[in-house]
Amino acid sequence: MDSRSNAPAVECHRLTKGFDSSQGRIAVLQGIDLRVEPGELFMLVGPSGCGKTTLLSVLAGILRPDGGSCSVAGVEWSSLSPSALASRRASTIGFVFQQFNLLPALTAAENVAVPLFLQGVGRRERLRAAHALLEQVGLERYADARPTKLSGGQQQRVAIARALVHSPKLIVCDEPTSALDHETGTRVMDLLRDRGLRDGRTIVLVTHDSRIYPYADRIAFMDDGMIIDIKDSRNQPASTGASHA
Amino acid sequence: MYPLAIQILSGDRAKFTALILGLSLASLLITQQLAIFCGLMWRTFAFLDDTPSARIWIMDADAEFPDAGISLPSTAVNVVRGIEGVSWAMPLFKRTLPLRLPNGKSESASVVGIDASTLIGGPMTMLEGRIEDLRRPDAVIIDEYGANVLLALEGPEGALVPLRVGDVLEINDQRAEIVGICRLSRNFEDFPILYTTYERALRYAPPERRLLSFVIAGLQSGADLALLKERIAAQTGLKALTIDEFKVSTFWYIAEETGIPINFGITVTLGFLVGISIAAQTFYTFTRDNLRQFAALKAMGARPGLLIGVVLSQALTVGVIGLGLGAGAASFIGYLTGEGDPPFLLLPPVLAATSLAILLTIGFAALLSIIPVLRLDPATVFRT
C-alpha cells in the first residue's frame, strides 16, 4: 500500500522564510509547525503582514522555504527540482485567487480547462471536463462567455471550477471572498465547501473575512510569522449563517 | 500552446492591431525602399540587358560602366578578331550627343552605333520599322520611351505628341531620320536611346582620335572563357568582361560613386528602427500587461518553456502577419507603378532581407518580453 495514502494533506515542520529588504533580512515565517488532514477546510487568518499569504505560497510550492520542511500529500517539496515541482503543482494543487486571475481572452470553459492544458490533456477531453465542472458550479450556460461578461461571483465560480477540474489533492484559496459582496461570498463558500472537499480533498484558505470563519473545520490564527492559536470547530455546535454546519 | 498564445494575443485587440500596424509599416517601408533601390540599380545595366548577343565586352582597363566614355583605338576590333577562341568581334559606339528636335528644342540622347553589316548589338524588339532600315541614309532607331515621353513634342493644347517614324532630328547638327521605334529597358540616366550604324555614329560624334567605345565579341563553341579573357587582356592591353561581370562592375561603380546606396540605406534603416521601436515597445507593453496572467499560469504549474513558447508564438505570429501585409502592400504599390517611376524590382533577396529585418525585430521584442516573464515571481499572483 502506498504510504502516501495515509499521509496528511499538508505537513510543515519548523518552517522559516524571510525576505531581503533595505533593513536587512526580514523573517516572515518563524518556525511554523502545521498538519492539515485530508478532507479538511483549514483557514489561515490574522492581520496583514503576519505571513499567512507567504505560508500559503510555501504550501502551494510557489515559494521555497529557507528552513524546515513542507510536504503535500506525502511529497516533500524540497526534494523536487523546480521542473518537477511545477509538474507536481500542476497535478496536485488547485488555485483560487482573490482577483480570480482568469485569462480574459479565453472563454469560461477554456479557463476552467487551463490546468488540464498544463498537464497536456487533449483539447476535446479537457473541454468536456470543463463543461462538466461548469455544470456543477451552475454556469453551464456561460461556458462560451468571456470573463469580462461575467459578474464577480460568476468569475469566482469559474475559478473554483478551474481549481477542481484536474481533481487536485489540495486547493489553496487566497481571500476568495474579499472581492465579493457578502451574499455572493456566502454562495462561493457554500460551493467551495460542497464541491471542494469531495473525495478527501483538502482546502487551505487565507482570509480576512471573519464572516466566512464558520465554514472552516479549523482556523489557525497567525501573528508575526507564527501560528499563535488553532481553533477546531469540527466538534462544536453549528454556527449561524454557514450552510455546511 | 499555440492556440492559447494566439487567444491571449488577439484578446487585446488594440495592442494586437498596433503590433500588426507597426510591423506592416516597417515591412512596407523596408520592402519598398529595397525594391526601388534594386529597380534603380538594375537600370544601370539596362543597356547590357538590351545587348544580350555580346558575350564578351572589351573596354579600356579603366572603364567600369557602359557610359565611362573612355575610347579605344579603332584597331582593337581587328586585334580581337584575331585572338584564338573569338568567333566574332564588332565595334560599338556609345556616347551622349546633343540633339535638336523637329520643333528646334535642344536635348541630349545616348547614341549607339552598331556594325552595319551584321547589326549585332542592335535592339532586340522592334515596334515599328525594321532593324535593317538602319542601313538607309541618315537612319536612326529610337526607343519607345524616348519617342513617347522623353523627346515627345508639345502639341497645340499642351498635349504630348510622340516622335514618329519619318520625323527628322539633328544629331550634332547633322541630319538623322527616325526609321524605327524599338522597345528597350528603362535606363538609369533616363536618356533617349538612338541606334544607328557605327560609321554614321562616328560622323555624328565630334572629331576625336579615338571613338570606339567597346568591342563586343562572341565565343567560339568549346572555348574556355576565362582563358579567352586572359588572352584578350594580354594581346590588347584591354579589359575583357563577360556580360555578368560587366553588370557587377557597373553596379559597384554606381554604388560607390553616387549617394544612392546611402540614401536608400538611411530610409531602410529608419524603417527598420521605426518598426523595431514600435513593435518592441508595444510587444513589451503587451507582455507587461499580461504578467499577472503569466504569473497565474506559472503558479498553476506552467513551466518556463511553455511561457517562452507562448511569447515566441505571439511574436512570430505578429511578425508573419506584419511581414505579409507590409510586403503585400509594397508589391501592390509596385504592381500599380508597373515599369514606370519609381522603378520597383521585387527580387527574392529583397523579401529575404525584409524577412530577416522583421525576424530581428520580433526576436528583439520577444527577448525583451521574455526576460520579465522568466523573472516573474509566481507568488505575485497572491498580491492584489
Image: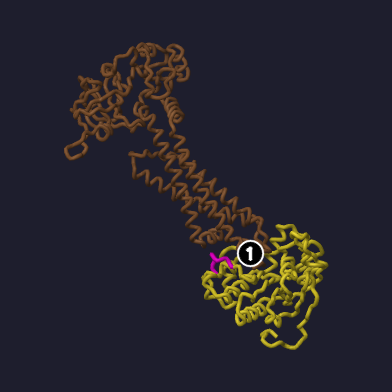
Chain colours: A yellow, B brown
Residue A126 falls left or right of residue B150: right
Rendering quarter of residue B142: top left
B49, above or below A42, in the image:
above
Q: Position of residue B194 (x, y in %)?
A: 27, 26
- In the rendered image, is residue A230 in sight? yes
Q: Which residue is mark 1?
A: B296
Q: Which residues are magenta?
A: A102-107
Which residue is drawn at the image coordinates 33% and 22% (left, top)? B94
Q: Quadrant of the C terminus of chain B?
A: bottom right
Residue B241 falls left or right of residue B103: right
User: Which residue type carries mark 1?
Assistant: Ala
- In the rendered image, is residue A132 in sight? no
Q: Of B21 and A195, which appears nearest the observer?
A: B21
Q: Chain of mark 1?
A: B
Q: Quadrant of the N terminus of chain B?
A: bottom right
Which residue is drawn at the image coordinates 53% and 55% (left, top)? B282
Q: Position of residue B357 (x, y in %)?
A: 51, 44
The question of residue A32 being in magenta is answered with no
Q: Position of residue A35 (x, y in %)?
A: 79, 73
A189, above or below A101, in the image:
below
Mark 1 surroundings within 10 Å by alpha-carbon count, few (fewer than 14), some (14 through 19), many (20 or more): many
Q: Position of residue B141 (x, y in %)?
A: 25, 26
Q: Of B299 and B209, which appears nearest the observer?
A: B209
Main SS, magenta residues: loop
Q: Of A38 and A125, which appears nearest the observer?
A: A38
Which residue is drawn at the image coordinates 77% and 76% (left, top)? A221
Which residue is drawn at the image coordinates 63% and 63% (left, top)? B297
Mark 1 falls on what kind of element?
helix
The question of residue A103 being in magenta is answered with yes
